Amino acid sequence: MDLANRPYLGSYEEAVARIAPLLEPVIGNCATQELAPLRSHPHVIEILHLALEERDGRSSLDRTVLATVHRTVEEALPASENDLNGFHVRSTDPVVDFAFVGTRYAYRTTRASIDALRRSGYDDLGILDLATAVADANLWARMFRLVGLPPALFYLGTSGV
């Protein structure tokens, strides 16, 4: 297997043109404007495009649940140094609680939280897809913050959710 880095041959405009149909229901015809921080990195737009396609075509989770996970992760990420300390109220919604704990301190996921997901109707595959969605949401939320993209761009790419 050849894992060598290769130059990305596509342009920013080509990458935006491919992803725009996925984002259009939410942001209208503003993809070029919204993705401008990535102008010098069209390969990242291509990665985002592939991630959106993968998320929408492969997850057993409903798009509303995916959007909930992404919103919860965005809200759970610390906004300041003061936000790192203190008591954080936990949600009674097992999906929101799982996403919050998975974002703030994944090592504190407990058997009780998994049992709560099971009582809510999630089987092993559903719980695995939730864990993947939490990890995915963390990756994109953190990257979007670093490059200055609107945080909701990824989770709102779920057909208007």
Image: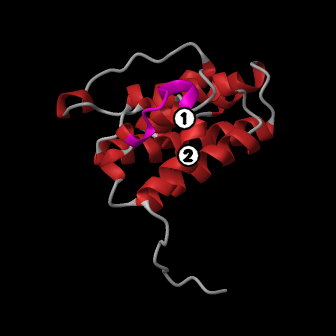
Q: Are marks 1 and 2 in contact (CB under 8 Å)?
A: yes
**Residue 26 in magenta stretch:** yes
Q: Position of residue 81 (x, y in %)?
A: 18, 34
Q: Residue furthest top?
A: 92
Q: Which residue is mark 1?
A: 23
Front-lying residue, 43 or 10: 10
Residue drawn where x is 68% and y is 48% of the image? 54
Q: Position of residue 99 (x, y in %)?
A: 53, 31
Query: Could you say which quadrant of the image residue 69 lies in?
Result: top right
Quadrant where the C terminus lies? Answer: top right
Q: Position of residue 141 (x, y in %)?
A: 41, 40
Front-lying residue, 117 or 160: 160
Query: Could you say which quadrant of the image residue 127 lies in?
Result: top right
Is residue 84 left or right of 22 when viewed as pictured?
left
- The colour scheme applied to this rendered structure is secondary structure
Quadrant where the N terminus lies? Answer: bottom right
Which stretch is magenta?
24-32
Residue type beneath disc 1: Leu
Is residue 18 left or right of 32 when viewed as pictured?
right
Where disc 2 sits, the SS reads helix
Determine which of the numbered discs, if any, sits on residue 19 in the image. Answer: 2
Residue drawn where x is 46% and y is 77% of the image? 7
